[in-house]
Amino acid sequence: MRALVVVLLVGVGLTAVSGLRFHVSEQNDVLPPGLPVARPFFKGARIVGGSVAAEGQFPHQVALLRSNALTCGGSLIDSRWVLTAAHCVYNGGTLIPATAITVLAGSVSLTAGVRRAVARIIPHERYGNFQNDVALLQLQQSLPTSAYIRPIALRTTSVPARSEVVISGWGRIYQGGPTSSVLRYNRATVLADQQCRAATGISSGLICFTSPVNNGACNGDSGGPAVLNNQLVGVANFIINYCGSSSPDGYAKVSDFVPWIQATMRRY
């Protein structure tokens, strides 16, 4: 997961677009020499701008830890199931062992809350090229429901353009900056599907959000939620160019994956 993932948005069946995109689980590194881009490009993971969350404000939000360190976010969608990004559960092309990930729930602090071991990791079978970027984690033990831990409902229909969603995570607070020890949140605006396709080259399974410059998702926010009316509408996937840029952020469109999520959970 620490490997550099930089994709020129041309070819491979994608429409040419104006920027580079990268997963928001990656750590900040300057783009290696030789790639055809004139401006610096960084990779990294946290919410840029926004505010510190209060305890219990986002009871569905979880953190994914490896070796006791933040790697990604996720959303509790059932007492034993977490929805996150598929790229959060791979190291390069290899699936990370379930025993390597711990789920932290129930607190805005990464040093508090309730921890659960992961029994099973199930990435979308067609994940690749920033598409179908969703995965399910089955916990070894259910999480207790409380004011601080509560599953969130899945959005089953498209979100109207110009709707305002809430994004949250422990990722970097600015490009190249530190990750946050406490959960932060911000607001973002839904981009029309046609504009999302034009900006990303991805025609389905994606919802795009725009924010004022110096706001939005950043490294460490991967897999985290976008919420509208107490429903999960997006899973943090990638950003374009850099954290807080004027380009939209790409999230997996939850409503497109509800049949896959439900069918997968029924199998186990």
Image: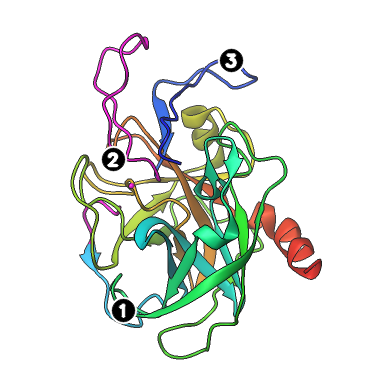
Horizontal arrangement in the rendering, residue 169 relative to residue 129 (left or right): left
Question: Image point 55% across, 78% down: which residue?
Answer: 151
From the image, tell me which residue sits under label 3: 11
Determine if the magenta segment contains residue 37.
Answer: yes
Q: Quadrant of the C terminus?
A: bottom right
From the image, tell me which residue sits under label 2: 243
Neighbours of disc 3 within 10 Å: few (<14), some (14-19), many (20+): few
Mark 2, secondary structure of its residue:
loop
Question: Which percent across, then down, holds residue 38?
Answer: 27, 12
Question: Image point 40% across, 25% down: which residue?
Answer: 20
Question: Image point 54% across, 50% down: which residue?
Answer: 89
Check disc 3 and give the amino acid type. Answer: Gly
Q: Nearer the viewer, residue 30 or 20?
A: 30
From the image, tell me which residue sits under label 1: 112
Determine if the magenta segment contains residue 61.
Answer: no
| Highlighted range, magenta | 25-50
Q: Are marks 2 and 3 in contact (CB under 8 Å)?
A: no
Q: Which mark is residue 34?
A: none
User: Which mark sits nearer the N-terminus, 1 or 3?
Assistant: 3
Check disc 1 and give the amino acid type. Answer: Ala
Q: Nearer the viewer, residue 259 or 84?
A: 84
3D distance between C-alphas at marks 1 and 2: 27 Å
3D distance between C-alphas at marks 2 and 3: 24 Å
3D distance between C-alphas at marks 1 and 3: 45 Å
Check disc 2 and give the amino acid type. Answer: Cys
User: Which mark sits nearer the N-terminus, 1 or 2?
Assistant: 1
Camera-side mark, 1 or 2: 1
Q: Are marks 1 and 2 in contact (CB under 8 Å)?
A: no
Q: Secondary structure of the magenta portion, mostly? A: loop
Mark 3, secondary structure of its residue:
loop
